[in-house]
Amino acid sequence: MHRFWEHVIKHVLIAVRPKTIVEIGSLTGVTTFKLLQYCKHLGGRCIVVDPSPQYDVALLREHYGEEVVNIIEQFSLEALPSINEYDMILIDGDHNWYTVYHELKLVEQMADKTGRFPVVLLHDTDWPYGRRDMYYYPDSIPEAFRKSYATKGMKPGQSELLEFGGFNNIAYNALYEGGERNGVRSAIEDFIKETPMKLRHYELFSNNGLSILVPKDEGSLIHSQISYILDSSGL
């Protein structure tokens, strides 16, 4: 996600001016720290959801204070029901159909209560995880929704995992690419087909892919700004 910061995410923040941001998937905090700087200077708040953040959580809380940051060390599907309202959410956690689809359904439930669907940014919507599941914690995915998987790598244009080497060969990757309920992009498409929310779907295909969901009633100015940001990003 952080590779989109300078040319896309920063400008979307300026256009949308969210007061409360949720970040799912913090990892080493590269994007988190930038979001917190935005919140600190513009009076916003960032809620970070990650079961195992790879930085000093106590130090971050002490530095920014609870007015700016709330770090929830849980799985996203456990944490999201307790977050009442937010204007923007960045989804870059577990890259599989089950998790992303249900994250979006929980966003929809929040919007049903508040009357406003947030701007949603989702990473890994193109190769390799657009059409292939990956599991950080396989046992957290119900068996009926969990593809057969292996810790083997991938290469573009080949559905089967490689026997040796390949991209991200230390991850739990689904054995095959494509098919129903497989991958991040498939989860987004299935959600959009089913939701009663009227959304516009913007896409970039570099850096493993970025999707942005924006309510159609957000206002023509916001849509024009986002279209311009993406067209001029060079990504």
Image (cartoon, helix red, strand yellow):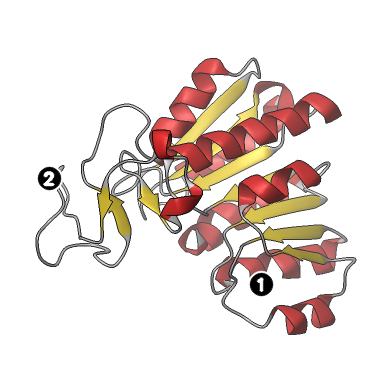
112 up-or-down from 172: above or below: above
Residue 216 horizontal side relative to residue 67, left or right: left
SS state under label 1: helix
Nearer to me, 8 or 150: 150
Q: Can you identify the residue that label 1 sits on?
A: 33
User: Residue at point 17% right, 49% down?
Assistant: 156
Q: Position of residue 204 (x, y in %)?
A: 41, 43
Amino acid bearing label 2: Gln
- Residue 15 seen in this snapshot: no
Q: Can you identify the residue that label 2 sits on?
A: 158
Mark before the other along the chain sequence, 2 or 1: 1
How far apart are the alpha carbons under marks 2 and 1?
36 Å
SS state under label 2: loop
- Residue 114 seen in this snapshot: yes
User: Residue at point 61% right, 64% down?
Assistant: 51
Q: Position of residue 216 (x, y in %)?
A: 66, 22
Q: Which mark is residue 208?
A: none
User: Residue at point 29% right, 53% down?
Assistant: 173
Given contact means CB atoms under 8 Å apart, are the residues at marks 2 and 1 in contact?
no
Residue 111 horizontal side relative to residue 212, left or right: right
95 up-or-down from 70: above or below: above
Q: Position of residue 19 (x, y in %)?
A: 83, 50
Q: Position of residue 167 (x, y in %)?
A: 22, 62
Residue 17 horizontal side relative to residue 95, left or right: right
Mark 2: few/some/many CA within 10 Å (<14, 14-19, 20+): few
User: Residue at point 41% right, 49% down?
Assistant: 124
